[in-house]
């Protein structure tokens, strides 16, 4: 069995992408399609008093304008189902498919125009007359939950979506018996996912009543479920297809109103409809993570060992919930991270505000938890006069305690167990690579020249490979073609190549001989999709097991045909061969036999088709861990930060394709740099978003992102047959913490404490000015 | 995000362009790097766009050791890459390199930027720094305006309806002058939060003999630090002089944005001014005659 | 209001009647079906739509098709044809894993094609500056820089 796992094989996806031949959603053009543009709310909160579409309807090239009333008459409901939830939503928390009475954020869809071209559709949107009665606007989650706050939505009982209490251990005792207690208030904002390809939907109703829907999504199966529920369409008549997807990063993890309104209107009118979100719409309507207000206390022993952590978290959910709310839960439960925290308590309030709904962006609440925890570690180090690495060493979970069970409950109700990893060795290794111990001398030298340089360290763990399962079928056709069909979603990460490698190794092939079909509910009717760094672990394990089954079956049949014992057979170059000879039979020939011929029986003990269908299940999460060191230089007169060096150690278990893993990590770090220094979705007090262009919402570009030095440790996860751990988000999670720590270190002479992210230049300027006003730095 | 409908005209002569501009609600289309996004966002909906790209007369560029005269439709990138310009007025490539990105400099024009007048744009700052003369054509004839008179604020050039900026002319400082153009933006290529352009000549003793300072990005337009310029004649370059210059920033009008408050912008401008002065003075050759 | 225009794209002349407001990018994508050029923002910041017009890089979302009447346009589809080997820059992108979702890739490639036509020995800093107007959410840029350096080297060696 020639090794494939562990090789940086060229990606199967690349040639078509590089030649401009890949078909993303907007590259598809169906005969007779009409183009859709939406009228969206220009108010953050208002009642709709009047909607007059007559002028718009009269414009040449406009075919129809659909409002909430039209949809309601057709569907019998206009409320979205709650996605990713085992049960239906009980309270009115989901958005409207189209909104007609009250709007609760800028960008909420009110009407859809169907026209000959997108240009005309937009012309018509401008002609729709609408009168609003503005209602009070709530922009702050803190204000939202205050007594007597005006309501974000008139229909809701109040502005609290939910309160959660996460706790274990004797927290009171931990604090009352502590040598020291320190506290910190932290404001965290995470912006938008901003895949370079925006969202988009095409719906094609057919004469026979069936419906094909293309969507640029991470979650085709969720969309399938939603459309079936709302349209009452036969499951078998509906097919969701994801074309090439130009990045996910979270915004495509939700099923959106457009993914229902467009299929509904298409069926209503019997027309093929196409909508491509533009970047402004993406800024207004795609989910963001946004604001969390943290107040934390940490109780420590005299030597800095943690006794307990407690605090509160207020999370800004926006006006609605698209799916079961997981972000603040992730944030709250992930705080202890790689550390031993004997007692823990977080009170979480999830507040509605008049903004677009919040949901996961790469990292899904974990970066905020890591930032909060690492800030606490730095605070304790400073207060106790300890090195920041030393305080961490004293508190990291040591390897001999693995697997380490936290008295926390995962969403499934199962305890949180870290399966593997050596956090202390990880820290030592990254510190050695970074020259941590020599840095003070370098820093002092720089300071003599008036330069402020700093270094920061941060750790994180991430539960990856969320189950309960992923589907996969491995099939050999009589032509010899090997195909994989999976419910996993490809969104640019190279999952096709990775799955092909896993399969190839079992079948004695190379990855390029295997084709992988992802994200098509017609070809893989069951699946969960792409999120939570899950697909390598879940789909990878599924494909591994299915491929092994296929290999076994091939050997079994070949042993009949070749009259050789199974143990004497091997799979090489697409053939089952007798070891040490040229005698063999190709996989294609074996598949032809198992395809069956009328009247001929299969050999004894063999059933039809050279294929296997597996749905590998898991309840546990495989924990990746990561230790990052950032070096920065701060120009104190411009309040600007330059990242001068970045060293990232990961333990992501077995790396199936190290090149792809490296790509995920680098991209993840760059995303984290955006979160640390650039990306903020800004609104004015009336709820108008001010950052709806790429000139205002700043993504890091090539001139802001340094080269990264990466290091890998490979502790295989015992939880899955691959030994893999997820890799899509872990690179992002510690970045804000490492960078902010480095900035604070650089500015030590200014005695600045930074308790927020992103750290925008304006904030840094104000912090520096304040210090200067206090006579700092001392001459 | 599609542009609203308009009629498109591509005249081959300035005369035709001027006539076309007389139609109701007509606008000039130069490089389109600012106009087209505004159309795509539907912030504007003109009935006619008059594309000036085929008018040869607007493409001319004359560079001598006394002056430079640039046609309004010259692309920014052509100037950036002009060896001639780099020789006589090296501040130009230094500043132009900081405009947007190569793709927008390829398409963006000198005249387009000078008429769009973003307060932190490099070209208006350079024009003001050089006491440029703007040449403006209409069906009535040609008139001239000084940079001070032409630059009235963001997106507010002193152009009457039907007028076209055809050329801009700037006197060139003598060989050996010092120069620097510094700006600071959130990311490379973004509109600057503030910028500082300096031209300086020093006499044989090393003292400031002639000085021009222009600050961009603070208020609604770039601004010359005339008071500092005259105050510092005869001063010796050095920290003291740089501080004295920077002290003038406090009096300048400044407006905050989502990226930087007025106070922060002023701090940036002070810092850039000091640094730019230091660089410019270091680059200046000691000269006997500077006039 | 329609205008008749002729644009030579990757060596083939296309004559069409278009509305003046149709961007060059939309023309390429939807009029003549060359969908390799992508739109990431349609307001001139992301660079995904970068193409070459008369040999220089431009953003095809900030140009109307009518403005390109009579011009020579090069797009990603012109770099290499299916079946033929990849262009050295494309090959370098593949080798260095300089693309993930591939959405920014055509714009990156066309921008770097221009840079490499100006210099076959760029510094890493020059490469970063050249692509500073092209946003990539996936790669963290480093592999794109490495790919440009590899391609420059390959192109230098080819010339010798
Ligand atoms: S689509 Fe043209 S720059 Fe973004
Ligand atoms: S590869 Fe996905 S945006 Fe660059």
Image (cartoon, coloured by chain):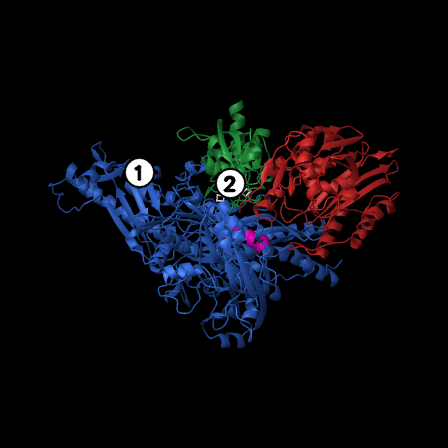
Chain colours: A blue, B red, C green
Residue nearest the observer in this picture, B80 or B204: B80
Residue nearest the observer in this picture, B103 or A408: B103
Residue A223 shows up from this direction: yes
A333 left or right of A757?
Answer: left
Residue identified by numbered label 2: C143
Residue nearest the observer in this picture, A128 or A394: A128
Q: Main secondary structure of the magenta part?
A: helix
| Picture disc at residue A239 | none
Q: In this view, does C66 lie above or below B121?
A: above
A514 left or right of A691?
Answer: left
Instruction: Give the CA separation, mark 1 to mark 2.
Output: 28 Å
Give the residues drawn in magenta, as a range: A671-680
Q: Quadrant of ligand 1?
A: top right
Q: In this view, does B269 lie above or below A504?
A: below
Residue nearest the observer in this picture, A405 or A68: A68
User: Does mark 2's beta carbon lie closer than 8 Å to ligand 2?
Assistant: no
Disc 2: host chain: C
As for residue A330 lying within the magenta part, the answer is: no
Residue B185, horizontal then vertical, whole percent: 66, 48
Q: Please tell me whether mark 2 sits on a helix, a strand or a loop.
A: helix
Residue identified by numbered label 1: A509
Q: Is residue A184 above or below residue C61?
A: below
Q: Please tell me whether mark 1 sits on a helix, a strand or a loop.
A: loop
Residue A682, horizontal then vertical, whole percent: 59, 58
Looking at the rendered structure, whether the residues under marks 1 and 2 are on a common chain is answered as no
User: Does mark 1's beta carbon lie closer than 8 Å to ligand 2?
Assistant: no
Query: Disc count in the image?
Result: 2
């Amino acid at each position: 069995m020639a090794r494939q796992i562990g090789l940086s094989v060229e990606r199967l996806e690349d040639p078509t992408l590089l030649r401009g031949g890949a078909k993303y959603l907007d590259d598809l053009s169906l005969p007779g399609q009409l183009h859709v543009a939406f009228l969206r709310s220009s108010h953050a909160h208002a009642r709709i008093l009047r909607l007059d579409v007559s002028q718009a309807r009269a414009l040449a090239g406009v075919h129809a304008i659909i409002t909430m009333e039209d949809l309601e008459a057709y569907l019998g409901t206009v409320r979205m189902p709650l996605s990713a939830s085992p049960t239906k939503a009980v309270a009115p928390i989901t958005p409207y498919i189209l909104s007609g009475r009250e709007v609760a954020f800028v960008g909420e869809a009110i009407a859809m125009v169907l026209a000959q071209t997108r240009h005309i559709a937009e012309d018509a949107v401008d002609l729709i007359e609408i009168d609003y009665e503005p209602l009070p606007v709530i922009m702050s989650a803190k204000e939202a939950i205050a007594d007597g706050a005006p309501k974000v939505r008139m229909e809701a009982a109040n502005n609290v979506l939910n309160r959660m209490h996460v706790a274990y251990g004797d927290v009171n005792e931990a604090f009352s018996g502590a040598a020291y207690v320190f506290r910190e208030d932290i404001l965290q904002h995470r912006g938008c996912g901003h895949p370079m390809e925006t969202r988009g939907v095409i719906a094609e109703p057919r004469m026979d009543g069936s419906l094909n829907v293309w969507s640029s999504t991470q979650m085709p199966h969720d969309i399938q479920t939603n459309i079936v529920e709302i349209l009452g369409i036969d499951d078998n008549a509906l097919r969701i297809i994801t074309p090439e997807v130009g990045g996910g990063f979270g915004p495509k993890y939700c099923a959106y109103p457009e993914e229902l309104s467009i299929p509904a209107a298409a069926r209503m009118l019997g027309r093929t409809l196409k909508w491509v979100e533009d970047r402004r719409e993406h800024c207004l309507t795609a989910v963001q993570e946004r604001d969390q207000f943290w107040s934390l206390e940490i109780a420590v022993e005299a030597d800095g060992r943690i006794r307990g952590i407690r605090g509160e978290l207020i999370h800004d959910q926006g006006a609605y919930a698209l799916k079961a709310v997981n972000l603040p839960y992730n944030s709250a439960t992930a705080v202890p991270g790689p550390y031993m925290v004997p007692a823990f308590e977080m009170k979480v309030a999830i507040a509605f505000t008049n903004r677009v709904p919040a949901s996961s962006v790469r990292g899904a609440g974990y970066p905020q938890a890591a930032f909060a925890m690492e800030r606490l570690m730095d605070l304790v180090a400073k207060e106790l006069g300890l090195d920041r690495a030393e305080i961490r060493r004293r508190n990291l979970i040591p390897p001999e305690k693995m697997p380490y069970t936290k008295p926390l409950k995962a969403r499934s109700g199962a305890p949180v167990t870290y399966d593997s990893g050596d956090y202390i060795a990880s820290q030592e290794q990254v510190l050695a690579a970074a020259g941590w111990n020599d840095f003070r001398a370098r820093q002092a030298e720089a300071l003599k020249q008036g330069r402020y340089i700093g270094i920061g360290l941060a750790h994180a763990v991430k539960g990856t490979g969320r189950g309960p399962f992923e589907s996969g079928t491995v099939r050999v056709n009589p032509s010899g073609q090997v195909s994989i069909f999976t419910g996993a979603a490809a969104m640019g990460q190279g999952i096709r190549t990775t799955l092909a490698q896993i399969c190839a190794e079992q079948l004695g092939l190379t990855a390029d001989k295997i084709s992988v079909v992802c994200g098509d509910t017609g070809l893989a009717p069951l699946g969960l999709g792409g999120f939570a760094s899950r697909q390598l672990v879940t789909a990878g394990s599924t494909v591994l097991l299915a491929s092994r089954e296929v290999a076994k079956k091939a050997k079994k049949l070949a042993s009949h045909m070749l009259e050789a014992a199974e143990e004497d057979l091997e799979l090489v170059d697409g053939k089952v061969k007798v070891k040490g000879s040229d005698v063999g039979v190709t996989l294609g020939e074996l598949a032809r036999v198992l395809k069956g011929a009328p009247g001929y029986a299969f050999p004894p003990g063999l059933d039809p088709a050279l294929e296997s269908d597996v749905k590998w299940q898991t309840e546990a999460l495989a924990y990746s861990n990561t230790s990052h060191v950032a070096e920065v230089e701060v120009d104190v007169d411009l309040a600007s930060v330059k990242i001068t060096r970045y060293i990232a150690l990961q333990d992501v278990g077995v790396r199936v394709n190290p090149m792809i893993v490296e790509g995920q990590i680098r991209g993840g770090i760059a995303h984290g740099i955006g979160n640390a220094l650039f990306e903020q979705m800004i609104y004015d007090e009336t709820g108008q978003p001010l950052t709806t262009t790429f000139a205002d919402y700043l993504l890091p570009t090539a001139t802001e992102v340094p080269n990264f030095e990466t290091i890998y440790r490979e502790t295989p996860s015992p939880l899955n047959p691959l030994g893999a751990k997820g890799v899509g988000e872990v690179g992002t999670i510690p970045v804000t913490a490492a960078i902010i720590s480095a900035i604070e270190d650089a500015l030590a002479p200014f005695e600045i404490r930074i308790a927020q992210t992103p750290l925008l230049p304006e904030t840094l300027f104000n912090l520096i000015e304040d210090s200067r006003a206090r006579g700092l730095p001392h001459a | 995000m599609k542009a609203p409908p308009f009629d498109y005209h591509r005249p081959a002569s300035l005369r035709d362009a001027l006539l076309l501009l007389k139609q109701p609600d007509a606008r000039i289309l130069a490089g389109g790097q600012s106009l087209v996004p505004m159309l795509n966002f539907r912030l504007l909906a003109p009935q006619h766009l008059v594309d000036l790209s085929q008018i040869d007369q607007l493409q001319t560029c004359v560079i001598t050791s006394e002056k430079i005269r640039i046609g309004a439709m010259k692309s920014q990138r052509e100037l950036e890459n002009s060896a001639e310009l780099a020789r006589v007025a090296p501040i130009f490539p230094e500043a132009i390199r900081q405009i947007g990105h190569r793709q927008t400099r390829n398409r963006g024009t000198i005249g387009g930027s000078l008429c769009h007048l973003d307060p932190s744009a490099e070209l208006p700052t350079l024009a003001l720094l050089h006491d440029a003369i703007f040449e403006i054509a209409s069906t009535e004839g040609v008139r001239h305006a000084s940079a001070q008179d032409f630059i009235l604020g963001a997106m507010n050039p002193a152009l009457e309806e039907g007028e076209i900026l055809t050329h801009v002319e700037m006197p060139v400082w003598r060989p050996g002058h010092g120069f620097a153009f510094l700006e600071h933006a959130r990311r490379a290529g973004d509109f600057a939060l503030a910028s500082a352009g300096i031209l300086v000549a020093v006499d044989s003793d090393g003292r400031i003999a002639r000085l021009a300072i222009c600050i961009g990005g603070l208020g609604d337009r770039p601004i010359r630090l005339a008071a500092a310029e005259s105050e510092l004649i005869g001063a010796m370059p050095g920290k003291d002089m740089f501080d004295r210059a920077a002290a003038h920033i406090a009096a300048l009008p400044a407006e905050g944005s989502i990226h930087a408050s007025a106070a922060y912008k002023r701090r940036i401008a002070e810092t850039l001014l000091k640094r730019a002065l230091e660089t410019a003075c270091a680059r200046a050759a000691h000269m006997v005659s500077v006039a | 209001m329609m205008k008749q225009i002729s644009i030579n794209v990757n060596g083939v002349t296309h004559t069409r009647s278009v509305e003046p407001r149709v961007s060059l990018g939309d023309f390429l994508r939807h009029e003549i079906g060359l969908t390799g050029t992508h739109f990431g923002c349609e307001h001139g910041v992301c660079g995904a739509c970068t193409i070459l017009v008369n040999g220089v890089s431009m953003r095809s979302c900030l140009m109307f098709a009518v403005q390109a009447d009579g011009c020579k346009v090069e797009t990603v589809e012109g770099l290499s044809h299916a079946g033929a080997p990849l262009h050295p820059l494309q090959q370098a992108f593949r080798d260095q894993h300089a693309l993930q979702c591939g959405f920014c890739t055509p714009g990156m490639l066309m921008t770097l094609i221009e840079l490499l036509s100006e210099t076959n020995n760029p510094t890493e800093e020059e490469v970063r500056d050249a692509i500073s107007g092209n946003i990539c959410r996936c790669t963290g840029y480093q592999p794109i820089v490495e790919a440009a350096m590899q391609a420059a080297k390959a192109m230098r060696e080819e010339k010798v």
